Amino acid sequence: MKFDKYCTGCEQCNKRIPLFTSLTDGELEVLNKDRYSVRFHEGEVILKQGTRVDFQVTVIEGFAKMYIEGYQNRNLILDFLKPMRLVGAPMTQTDGKLRYNVVAIRETLVCFIDLNNFKEVLASNSKFSEQFMIHCSMNYLTALDRMVGISQKQMHGRVADALIYLSKEIYNGPVIGDEITRQDIAEYSSMSKDSAIRVLKEFERDQIIRLEGRKIEVLDPDRLDKISDKG
């Protein structure tokens, strides 16, 4: 096994990953076999769309984004990845190739688990297999909800959705950090950068948010919710 010099070891990480709580010591030993960690700097590619993979990935520390490369160099951000989030699930592949990119937003420590070992544990533990299926299903349902929002909501509703998700689910507070660029918000909302900036300035004018450099503070979450509901 090869580990980053700052890695605290598999035992500590296993305790922090909710999906692994149902595994026995023997099953964890199987997962830990051939496991290794790598530290990525801001902007470095962790997973590349179109490549073949033979590992299950977990973000241990830091922050990353998952996105699809679209036509004419337009990207669609699927999600922002916090620590202890499983990425690159086998269920997301059909021919062994990744359908998305994962890039570090800031310095990020990533753990790579051998895919065959992961599948072995899935086959041996029905509870773990069920939890993993639920995990994949929830990700799928979240993606469906986002696609509905992107296809049916106007720009203000889409930006409101992005700010609600970032503040509540990613930052767990009203302030969205400066790691999130205006381009990121545009690509998460499926619009141009100029359009996203214009909507953000309108939200600031209406005292719904405060813009401080690249940071965004949500001042009136109730109004954001209403904008999101109206679409």
Image (cartoon, grey):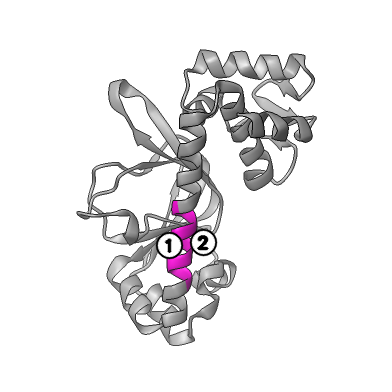
Residue of label 1:
3
Picture residue at 61% right of the left edge, 23% below the top: 156
Q: Is residue 144 left or right of residue 226?
A: left
Residue 158 visible (yes or no): yes
Type of amino acid at the residue the image marks with label 2: Cys
Q: Image quadrant of residue 76?
A: top left
Secondary structure beneath disc 1? loop
Front-lying residue, 18 or 39: 18
Q: Position of residue 168 (x, y in %)?
A: 68, 44
Question: Of helix, strand and loop, which mostly describes the magenta segment?
Answer: helix
Which numbered tag is attached to residue 7? 2
Query: Does the segment drawn in magenta span residue 139?
Result: yes
Which image quadrant: the C terminus?
top right
Q: Position of residue 92 (x, y in %)?
A: 33, 54
Query: Does the segment drawn in magenta span residue 75?
Result: no
Secondary structure beneath disc 2? loop
Q: Position of residue 84 (x, y in %)?
A: 54, 59
Picture residue at 56% right of the left edge, 19% below the top: 196
| 10 Å crowding of disc 1: few (<14), some (14-19), many (20+) | some
Picture residue at 56% right of the left edge, 68% below the top: 18
Q: Which residues are magenta?
A: 131-140
Residue 81 lies, with reference to residue 207, above or below; the image says below
* Dot 1 and dot 2 residues touching (CB under 8 Å): yes
Residue 42 lies, with reference to residue 13, above or below; the image says above
C-alpha gap between disc 1 and disc 2: 6 Å
Q: Image quadrant of residue 90?
A: bottom left
Q: Position of residue 20 (x, y in %)?
A: 51, 73
Which numbered tag is attached to residue 163? none
Type of amino acid at the residue the image marks with label 1: Phe
Picture residue at 37% right of the left edge, 55% below the top: 88
Q: Is residue 77 left or right of residue 206?
A: left
